[in-house]
Image (cartoon, rainbow, N blue to C red):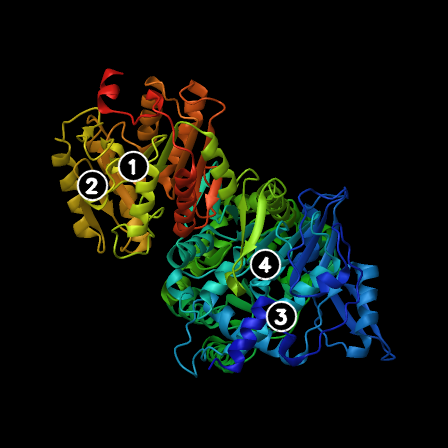
C-alpha cells in the first residue's frame, strides 16, 4: 500500500492538495484576466491551462519578480498596533529594476522576514500591494520551518555547495516530509503569483534555489507564460547532484522555464551535464546562444554574473566619513598593513582556512609580525545547526591562538568583528584595507571583491586631497571556487584548502609594487563599473524576450502528470493525422506512393522481437494488392533481414540500408543505388572505429553491406558524445578523398556511400512513377527519426520541380509529437497500424479498377527504359 506521505506528495505535485492540512486561504488580491472564464475556474486547482492564441490588447509590459523574500523591511509599530514597512535598499531584487525598461511595471511576490498574525494578513497584503506593489506569501510556521530551515538549508544548500550527506551526523538523511513542505511552499508562492498575473502580457522572473519547482506550478496553469529563472547559488557537478533523491523532479521543473540563468559557465555546464545524463537532453550553441531542445521548446541557458549597484555604493561613500570616521580607523591601524575579510558566518565561507593562512604567513614571513593585521568581519549566520556551531567554535579558538602567539602590546594580528555592520561601515573598512581576502570553499557569486574595488576607486575624501590625487590601487586574493573569480583576472586566485599557497598569495599581494597594484585595480574597476546589476538584469530580460518571441505563434499543450508535466510546443500547421481525411483522399486518388519506415514506425522501438507481426504482413499485403498503390518499406536495416521478414509480401518494394539496396517486388533483383561500388574505404574507416571502440567502454561497431556504424548508446553519455565528435573529425580527415559521407546521429557515427539517403529513395520512386506516366496524386510518407526527415523534405522539392503535381495529396507524417519537417503526426506505432488498416479496408471496399495500363504495377523494364 502506498504511504500516506507519498500520496500527499503526489497530490501536492498535481496541484490538488490543501497544503499540509492547512485550510486554503481565501483569495485576497485582485486578479487581472485577459482570457474568458470565471475566477472560480482559476481557483479550482484542476482547471485547464489558461492560454490564448493571440496576445491580449494590453500594451504595457509587466514583470513579476518572485523570490523567497520581498525587498522590504518590516517593523512593529512602537504602539504594537500594526506594521511599518520600508524598501530594503540592499536587496538585489530592488536594485535590478535599474536594468528593466523605464515604462515596465514591477510586481514582487515573496515572503516577509517577520511572522504576521493571521488576523493582520489581509491588511498587510493590501498595504504592501498598494504602496510597494508587493504580494506577500504567508507560509504557515510548520511549512516555513520545514521548507526553509529544512529542505532548503539542510538538503539543497549543502548539496549545491558540494557537501554530501554521508551520515546522520554529517549532512543528515533525506527527509521526504521536508520535500513535501518544499513543494507545498512553492505551491503557495504560485497561488500568490496567479492572483495578480496577466498571463498573456506579464513576464515572470523567479530567483534562486528556494523556488525551483515553481515553474511547473505556473506552467501547468499558463502554457504560454513568459518565464525565466536565475540560480544565485552554485550548481554542482552531475556526480554530486545525482545523489539527490528528487533530482529529476527538480530538473524537469526548471525546464518549464523559458530561460535559465547561472553566474558562471561551470554552473551552466554542470546543469547541462545533468540534463544530458539524467534526461537524455543535448544542448546546442547557435550564434552565441545556448539552447536545450525539450519537447519542441527551446530553453535558453544564460551565463551572466550579477554585479553591484554602483549608485548605492557611490552614495554610501559620500557618507562614509560622516557615519564612520575613516580617519579614526586609519589612526587605529597606523603603520599597519590591513588585510580584510568580509564573510557570512557559514561553513562554506572558509573563514577558518583564512585564519590558518594568516597564521602561516606570520610564521613564514616574520617581517609581517607586528605589521600585518587581518580584520575579519563576520555577518550573522542565516542558517543554524551543529556544523555551524562547530565552525564558530573553531574560528574563535584560532583567533585566540594567533593573537596569543603573535600579539604584542598595541598589536593584535587578528581583529574579529562578530556583529552586524552597515554598508557605510563596511565601506570605511574597505577604505583602509590594502588587500581583501576571500577564501570561500564554495560560493555562488560573492560581491565583496566588487564592493572593495569600487570603494578603493573613490574612497578618499577632500580632507585627504594628497592621497585623492594619487593613483588608486587595490589587491585581491580570491578562492578559485567562487562565482566572481573568473571575472577578476587581475586577482591572485588560490585553492583555499592549500594553506601554504594561500599564505604565500597573501604575502605576495601586500608585497606587490604600487604600480602593479594600480594596473590590476584599473582593470578590475573597468569591468565592475560597466558590468553592474543593471547591466545584468537588462541582459537577462533581453534574452528572456528573445526566448519567448514565438510563444503566441506556436501550438502548445501540456502533457504528463506530477513533476513529469511539460509543455509541447509545435508549429501551428503541425497536427494529428485524421484517418477520415486520409481515407477520403486515398479513395479519390488513382496513383499512390506509400513509403513506410520500419523501426519505430510499424515496429515499436522497445520490441525485442523485431519480426513483423502477422497483422502487419496482412495489412501490407492488402495494400499491395491494390493496383493503384506503390508500397515501399524504407529502412536502415540490411536487405537480408528485411527480405526475409517481408517475403510473404510479393508486391512490396524494399529500400534497405537507407536506399543503397532497392527492389520493387520479390520477383525483381536488388538494385544498387550508390554512385560507387568501391568499398576500399572500409579498410581505412574500420581500424579507426576499432580504435575508438577499444577506448570507449559500451560502444560497438555494426557492419552493414554498404556502411559502418559506430554505436555509443551504452557508453558514458559525456565520454561517448566526446568520442563521437572526435571520431567524426578523425574519419572526415582520413576519408576526405573517398566517395563516402560521414554523419553523426543519435548515439551513432555512420560512414556510408555518398548520395545515399531515404530522401533519394523517395525522389527515385516519384520520378520513376512520373516518367512512366503514373505521376503520384497521393503520397503517404511515415517515419519516426532523423533519417526520415530527408523523405519529408524531398516531397516539397518534388512538388517544386514538377515531379509531383501541386494538387497531389501529401501526407508526410512523423511518429510522436516532436519537431519535424512533416506536417502531420501520429502518436505511436499502434496509431500507424490503425491508419494503414483503414487504408487497406478502403482498398477492399473500393470498386475494382479497369485494366488501364496506368493502373498496372510499375515493372523493372519500364524503369530501365526510362
Image height of 683 relative to 468, above or below:
above
Q: Earlier in the sequence, mark 4 or mark 1?
A: 4
Is residue 291 something one can see in this rendering? yes
Query: Which residue position is annotated with label 4?
Result: 215
Q: Of circles 1 and 2, which is in front?
A: 2
> Which residue is more in the foreground, 766 or 393?
766
For marks 3 and 4, give the CA distance.
16 Å
Q: Earlier in the sequence, mark 2 or mark 4?
A: 4
Q: Are marks 3 and 4 in contact (CB under 8 Å)?
A: no
Q: Are marks 4 and 1 in contact (CB under 8 Å)?
A: no
Query: Which residue position is annotated with label 3?
Result: 16
Query: Which residue position is annotated with label 2?
Result: 643
Instruction: Point out residue 825 in the picture as x, y percentages from the top left corner.
Output: 47, 43
Give the residue furthest to the top: 865
Residue under the image location 32 percent in, 19 percent down: 772
For marks 3 and 1, give the CA distance.
48 Å
Is label 1 in a helix, a strand or a loop? strand
Query: Which residue position is annotated with label 1?
Result: 743
Is residue 251 left or right of 663 when viewed as pictured? right
Instruction: Point out residue 818 in the picture as x, y percentages from the top left corner.
Output: 47, 46
For marks 1 and 2, give the CA distance.
26 Å
Q: Quadrant of the C terminus?
A: top left
Q: Quadrant of residue 334?
A: bottom right
Amino acid at each position: 500500500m502506498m504511504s500516506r506521505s507519498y500520496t500527499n506528495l503526489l497530490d501536492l505535485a498535481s496541484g490538488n492538495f490543501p497544503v499540509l492540512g492547512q485550510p486554503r486561504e481565501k483569495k485576497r488580491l485582485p486578479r487581472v484576466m485577459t482570457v474568458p472564464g470565471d475566477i472560480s475556474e482559476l481557483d479550482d486547482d484542476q482547471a485547464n491551462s489558461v492560454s490564448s492564441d493571440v496576445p491580449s490588447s494590453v500594451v504595457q509590459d509587466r514583470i513579476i519578480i518572485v523570490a523567497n523574500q520581498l525587498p522590504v523591511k518590516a517593523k512593529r509599530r512602537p504602539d504594537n498596533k500594526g506594521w511599518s514597512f520600508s524598501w530594503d535598499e540592499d536587496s538585489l531584487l530592488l536594485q535590478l529594476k535599474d536594468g528593466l525598461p523605464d515604462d515596465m511595471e514591477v510586481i514582487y511576490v515573496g515572503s516577509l522576514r517577520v511572522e504576521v498574525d493571521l488576523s493582520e494578513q489581509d491588511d498587510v497584503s493590501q498595504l504592501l500591494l498598494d504602496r510597494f506593489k508587493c504580494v506577500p506569501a504567508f507560509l504557515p510556521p510548520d511549512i516555513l520551518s520545514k521548507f526553509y530551515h529544512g529542505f532548503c538549508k539542510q538538503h539543497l544548500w549543502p548539496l549545491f555547495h558540494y557537501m554530501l550527506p554521508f551520515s546522520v551526523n554529517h549532512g543528515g538523511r533525506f527527509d521526504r516530509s521536508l520535500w513535501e513542505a518544499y513543494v507545498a511552499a512553492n505551491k503557495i508562492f504560485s497561488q500568490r503569483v496567479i492572483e495578480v498575473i496577466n498571463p498573456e502580457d506579464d513576464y515572470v522572473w523567479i530567483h534562486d534555489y528556494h523556488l525551483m519547482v515553481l515553474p511547473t506550478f505556473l506552467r501547468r496553469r499558463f502554457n504560454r507564460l513568459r518565464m525565466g529563472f536565475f540560480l544565485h547559488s552554485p550548481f554542482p557537478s552531475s556526480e554530486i547532484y545525482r545523489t539527490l533523491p528528487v533530482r529529476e523532479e527538480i530538473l524537469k521543473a526548471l525546464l518549464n522555464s523559458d530561460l535559465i540563468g547561472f553566474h558562471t559557465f561551470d554552473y551552466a555546464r554542470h546543469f547541462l551535464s545533468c540534463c544530458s545524463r539524467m534526461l537524455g537532453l543535448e544542448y546546442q550553441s547557435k550564434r552565441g546562444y545556448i539552447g536545450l531542445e525539450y519537447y519542441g521548446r527551446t530553453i535558453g541557458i544564460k551565463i551572466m554574473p550579477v554585479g553591484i549597484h554602483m549608485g548605492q555604493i557611490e552614495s554610501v561613500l559620500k557618507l562614509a566619513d560622516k557615519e564612520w570616521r575613516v580617519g579614526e580607523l586609519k589612526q587605529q591601524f597606523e603603520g599597519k598593513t590591513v588585510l580584510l575579510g568580509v564573510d557570512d558566518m557559514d561553513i562554506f565561507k572558509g573563514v577558518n582556512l583564512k585564519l590558518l593562512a594568516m597564521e602561516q604567513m606570520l610564521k613564514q614571513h616574520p617581517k609581517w609580525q607586528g605589521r600585518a593585521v587581518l580584520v575579519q568581519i563576520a555577518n550573522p549566520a542565516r542558517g543554524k545547526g551543529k556544523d555551524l556551531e562547530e565552525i564558530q567554535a573553531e574560528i574563535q579558538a584560532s583567533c585566540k591562538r594567533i593573537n596569543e602567539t603573535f600579539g604584542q602590546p598595541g598589536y593584535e594580528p587578528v581583529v574579529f568583528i562578530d556583529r552586524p555592520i552597515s554598508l557605510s561601515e563596511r565601506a570605511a573598512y574597505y577604505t583602509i584595507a590594502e588587500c581583501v581576502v576571500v577564501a570561500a570553499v564554495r560560493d555562488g557569486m560573492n560581491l565583496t571583491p566588487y564592493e572593495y574595488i569600487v570603494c578603493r576607486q573613490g574612497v578618499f575624501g577632500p580632507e585627504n586631497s594628497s592621497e585623492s590625487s594619487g593613483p588608486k590601487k587595490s589587491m585581491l586574493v580570491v578562492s578559485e571556487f567562487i562565482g566572481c573569480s573568473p571575472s577578476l583576472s587581475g586577482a591572485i586566485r588560490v585553492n583555499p584548502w592549500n594553506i601554504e599557497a594561500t599564505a604565500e598569495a597573501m604575502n605576495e599581494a601586500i608585497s606587490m609594487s604600487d604600480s602593479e597594484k594600480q594596473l590590476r585595480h584599473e582593470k578590475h574597476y573597468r569591468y565592475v563599473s560597466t558590468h553592474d546589476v543593471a547591466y545584468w538584469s537588462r541582459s537577462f530580460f533581453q534574452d528572456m524576450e528573445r526566448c519567448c518571441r514565438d510563444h503566441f505563434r506556436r501550438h502548445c499543450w501540456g502533457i504528463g502528470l506530477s513533476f513529469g508535466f511539460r509543455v509541447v510546443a509545435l508549429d501551428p500547421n503541425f497536427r494529428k493525422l485524421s484517418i477520415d481525411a486520409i481515407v477520403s483522399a486515398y479513395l479519390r486518388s488513382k496513383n499512390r506512393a506509400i513509403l513506410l519506415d520500419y523501426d519505430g514506425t510499424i515496429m515499436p522501438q522497445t520490441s525485442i522481437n523485431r519480426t513483423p507481426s502477422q497483422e502487419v504482413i496482412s495489412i501490407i499485403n492488402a495494400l499491395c494488392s491494390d493496383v493503384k498503390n506503390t508500397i515501399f518499406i524504407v529502412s536502415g536495416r540490411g536487405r537480408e533481414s528485411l527480405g526475409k521478414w517481408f517475403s510473404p509480401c510479393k508486391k512490396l518494394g524494399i529500400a534497405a540500408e537507407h536506399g543503397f539496396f532497392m527492389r520493387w517486388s520479390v520477383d525483381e533483383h536488388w538494385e544498387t543505388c550508390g554512385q560507387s561500388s568501391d568499398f576500399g574505404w572500409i579498410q581505412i574507416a574500420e581500424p579507426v572505429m576499432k580504435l575508438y571502440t577499444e577506448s570507449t567502454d559500451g560502444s560497438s561497431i555494426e557492419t552493414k553491406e554498404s556502411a559502418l556504424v559506430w554505436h555509443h548508446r551504452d557508453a558514458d553519455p559525456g565520454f561517448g558524445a566526446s568520442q563521437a565528435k572526435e571520431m567524426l573529425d578523425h574519419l572526415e580527415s582520413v576519408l576526405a578523398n573517398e566517395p563516402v559521407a560521414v554523419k553523426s546521429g543519435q548515439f551513432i557515427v555512420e560512414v556510408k556511400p555518398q548520395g545515399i539517403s531515404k530522401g533519394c529513395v523517395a525522389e527515385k520512386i516519384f520520378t520513376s512513377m512520373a516518367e512512366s506516366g503514373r505521376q503520384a496524386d497521393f503520397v503517404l510518407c511515415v517515419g519516426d527519426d532523423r533519417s526520415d526527415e530527408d523523405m519529408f523534405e524531398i516531397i516539397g522539392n518534388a512538388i517544386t520541380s514538377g515531379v509531383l503535381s501541386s494538387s497531389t495529396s501529401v501526407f508526410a507524417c512523423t511518429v510522436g509529437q516532436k519537431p519535424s519537417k512533416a506536417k502531420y503526426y501520429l502518436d505511436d506505432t499502434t496509431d500507424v497500424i490503425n491508419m494503414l488498416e483503414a487504408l487497406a479496408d478502403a482498398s477492399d471496399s473500393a470498386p475494382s479498377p479497369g485494366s488501364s495500363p496506368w493502373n498496372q504495377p510499375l515493372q523493372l523494364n519500364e524503369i530501365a527504359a526510362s
